[in-house]
Amino acid sequence: MATMQKEEYKDRLRSQFDTALLDREEMEPDWMSTVRQRAMDAFEGQGFPTTRMEDWRYFNLSPLWQNSYSFQPVLNFNELAVKRNDLFGMNSACRMVFVNGRFSRELSSKDIMPKNLTVLPLSEAYSSHKESISSFLHNEAVWGENSLRSLNTAFMQDGALISIPDGMIVEEPIWLVFMAIPAERLESYQPRILVIAGENSQMTLIESHVAYKNGEYWSNPMVQLHAKQGAVIDHYKIQMESPHATHTSHYHSLLERDVHFTATSLSFGGGMVRNDIQTELKGEGIECTLNGLYMADERRLVDHHTSIDHQMPRCVSHELYKGIINGHATAVFNGKVYVREDAQKTDAKQTNQNLLLSADATVNTKPQLEIFADDVRCTHGATVGQLNEDELFYLRSRGISKEEGKKLLIWAFASDIIGRIKVDSLRYPLQERVFQQFNAGYIK
């Protein structure tokens, strides 16, 4: 029965793909249609990941193919009805908003971009920036071995192209907002973000995923980033989607010599959340930092899989992910650090810390090191624990209630990540978001 359902789903998916390809014929170049076709063939050859696969053993995707999702979302909504507080990052000077995977000019900022800085929706950039886009999308080594990445490539509706010239310092953060407005039918959104950071350039990118209503949908975004020599990149991803949503994201970054790269993942929403982060250190002197904070309650599932690939000497990587788990929720962390034979003088540190607030919460953590060089300094570790009773007793002895004491201790745990955020207009709302969850009964 399950096999038949999968085959029926693949047939429905192929039918949707063929229809979408015809609809896009006049809007996209021929080479893009070829890429989409190859991606669809790759997905059909692999199918959905299953729990029999080691990397997916805790993340069951069967509801996605058992239900009939539409990959051609509707855009039937009133943009003027969207309030400012519905968009996380509404006040950013450089803001691009995507609704159900497609660019919304009305909700995006109208400010003039700095000269030579390219920030465009993909739907408008195919002709003017063909070389940049095709170099990403033709790189089948990045998306071809992962069926969900292939699916994104086949069906991507829209997204952003960001290109920073050599030596440019972008003063204001570039803020990409992906808003879901669920329809009556089940829909899937497939946005793509392509980023090129020129030599010695600097930029801050903020990517937020939010829901206008608490409906059921599936978001499957993908980011590809190429940072050239000496670039400084800060990337923040905030995920605050519907509690009924499935979110499976993919991030591939390629870093050249002397790049300073920081990626921070903050997950506060969604029913089933999966973040795959893959980083290649392809030059010497790179400093790479991956940070993350995730909060899950009720029966939510949040899963992080990270990979840092040290390919050249004298690079540094730091990774710190923290989780706060309550109710019957489940958290998964699987972090891999590869140190190849040529990557001598590598300094890598990986840490995963989890705080369980209920007896029914579950954490599965698996930090890993694979080292093929002999002159390195690498450490990794994981902790899973509860609130410290001695610390809580100390606070209560100072006149602080038990509930407020718990909030203080949990905030101290979470602030280690939030306090590292350099953008004030992002850090302060996130602090409020954490406190809102506290006050909504997250802590009992």
Image: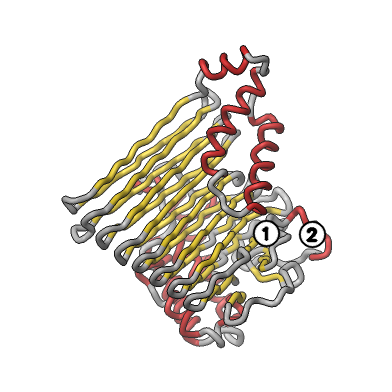
* Image coords of residue 116 (percent x, y): 57, 82
In depth, the one of 243 and 197 nearer the eye is 197
Q: Position of residue 17 (x, y in %)?
A: 54, 72
Callout 2 crowding tier (Cα within 10 Å): few <14, some 14–19, many ≥20: few
Q: Residue at x 50, y 37 (%)?
A: 323
How many marks do you count on the picture? 2
Circle 2: element type? loop
Q: Which mark is residue 82?
A: 2
Residue at 40%, 64% in the rendered image? 259
Spatial CA distance of label 2 from label 1 is 10 Å
The image shows residue 433, relative to residue 69, as above or below, that is above
Q: Report helix, strand or loop for mark 1.
A: strand
The answer to whether residue 223 is left or right of residue 268 is left
Mark number displayed over residue 268: none
Residue 291 location, x and y as percent?
47, 48
* Extreme residue toward the left, this view: 374
| Residue type for callout 1 | Met
* Camera-nearest residue between 222 and 218: 222
Determine whether 112 is above or below 143 in the image.
Answer: below
Q: Which mark is residue 179?
A: 1
Given residues 330 and 378, the one toward you in this image is: 378
Q: Residues within 10 Å of mark 1 (few under 14, many from 20)?
A: many
Tell which residue pokes out farthest to the right in this image. 81
Q: Quadrant of residue 87?
A: bottom right
- Nearer-the-camera pick, 144 or 351: 351
Identified at 69% across, 55% down, the residue is 88
- The residue that appears at 51% across and 67% down in the rendered structure is 202
Dot 2 amino acid type:
Val
| Relative image position of residue 375 (x, y in whole percent) | 18, 51
Work out whether mark 2 precedes mark 1 in sequence or the reverse, and give the earlier one: 2
Colouring used for the render: secondary structure
Q: Is residue 245 left or right of residue 184?
A: left
